[in-house]
Amino acid sequence: MRLSVFGDQVPLVVTRKGGLYTTLNWAGWAKGVSHLGEELRDIECGPDGRMYYLADNPTRIIINEKEHQD
Amino acid sequence: MIHYADIPGNPYFSLVPLERSQRRGIAPIPKGGDFSPTRLSLGMDGAIFVLDRAHAQVYRFSPEDGSQIWRIDGTEGGEAFVDPVYLSRGDGFYLYLTDRGSRKVWRIDYRGEIRGSLDLPFAMDPMFFELAAGRQMVLYDRTTALVHLLDDSGRSLFSFTPGGGGKAAEPVDFAVTLDGRSLFILWPGNGGVSSSDLFGRKSFDPLEIPAWTVNRCVCRCSGTRYRS
């Protein structure tokens, strides 16, 4: 599993196998579970407000063009 | 259209497949050799760095088309990387590579040139390393299980034992907020995520990662976006 943080505070993002990732809010609630439908090796919250995924098969970086919303 | 996969007792739960139209994929195809990336790192200016731990190499890719800008393995600086495990966020000039094999943290500039290493005599097994506020840095040492707050030369200013995860647990991952003032640690099992400031003062009780976030509902739901 991997951990990443958006901006100056939460939400946190925790990756899971199977391309799932979990977004937590301050209180520890899981706000959402998202998936790309493929295995992820890593995930990063970009300083530009976008999410970046290191995906497998084929190996590539996927950028979520939609800016994150708290 | 928004689809929510509501879970009883948790009104905040939603399941969000990322719509293809929102994706932009770039394909890092290194020039020659195998490629087995393990960790992604981003610079404040959009720079993309990737660590290939198996081959002990660091890459920089263009965010525009995924083309490889450079690749290094440490030999450029006279000492090959041995077991690089963690790549810090880039600050616009440098990023830092934690090498457990050599017990060093390498400073690498954005042109792929190695600008020396930090002298860390107090760290027997440096694991995670991130930039913090005020030109400081944060290091987790696996042997001592301590988080060190470092000055810009690598001198330890303060250290503390991070809370959460239990006595025997080792952190799985580590993150520092963009302002460099808060630290988050992901613990294995049900340890959840703990948070503190740079002096070890706990921000909140460890956040739990609910097991129900992975369930069979995942396969049946679809949607385009979510908003809590």
Image (cartoon, rainbow, N blue to C red):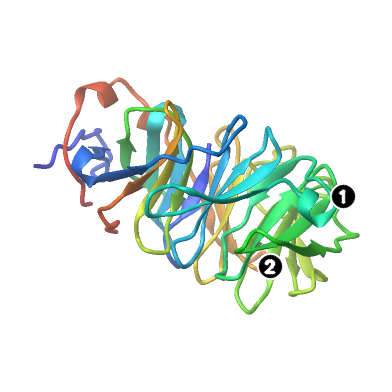
Could you tell me if residue B145 is visible in this image?
A: no
Residue B226, percent across and down?
21, 47
Label 2–label 1 contact, CB within 8 A: no
Give me the residue at 40% from left, 48% from top.
Answer: A52
Could you tell me if residue B214 is visible in this image?
A: yes
Chain of the residue on which disc 2 is drawn: B
Q: Give the distance between the C-alpha atoms of the residues marked 2 and 1, in whole angstroms.
A: 17 Å
Q: Dot 2 corresponds to which residue?
A: B137
Mark 2 or mark 1: whose residue is earlier in sequence: 1
Give me the residue at 64% from left, 47% from top.
Answer: B58
Instruction: Name the quadrant of the N terminus of chain B.
Output: top left
Question: A53 above or below A6?
Answer: above
**A51 or A26, which is in the foreground?**
A51
Left or right, B35 with respect to B168, comes to: left
Q: Dot 1 corresponds to which residue?
A: B124
Residue B85 image-quadrant placement = top right
**B214 or B24, which is in the foreground?**
B24
Question: What residue occupies the far right of the structure in this picture?
Answer: B121
Left or right, B148 with respect to B122, comes to: left
Residue A43, percent across and down?
46, 44
Residue B209, percent across and down?
46, 39
Give me the residue at 59% from left, 34% from top.
Answer: B32
Left or right, B11 with respect to B113, comes to: left
Left or right, B99 with respect to A5, comes to: right
Residue B93: assigned label:
none
Amino acid residing under circle 2: Met
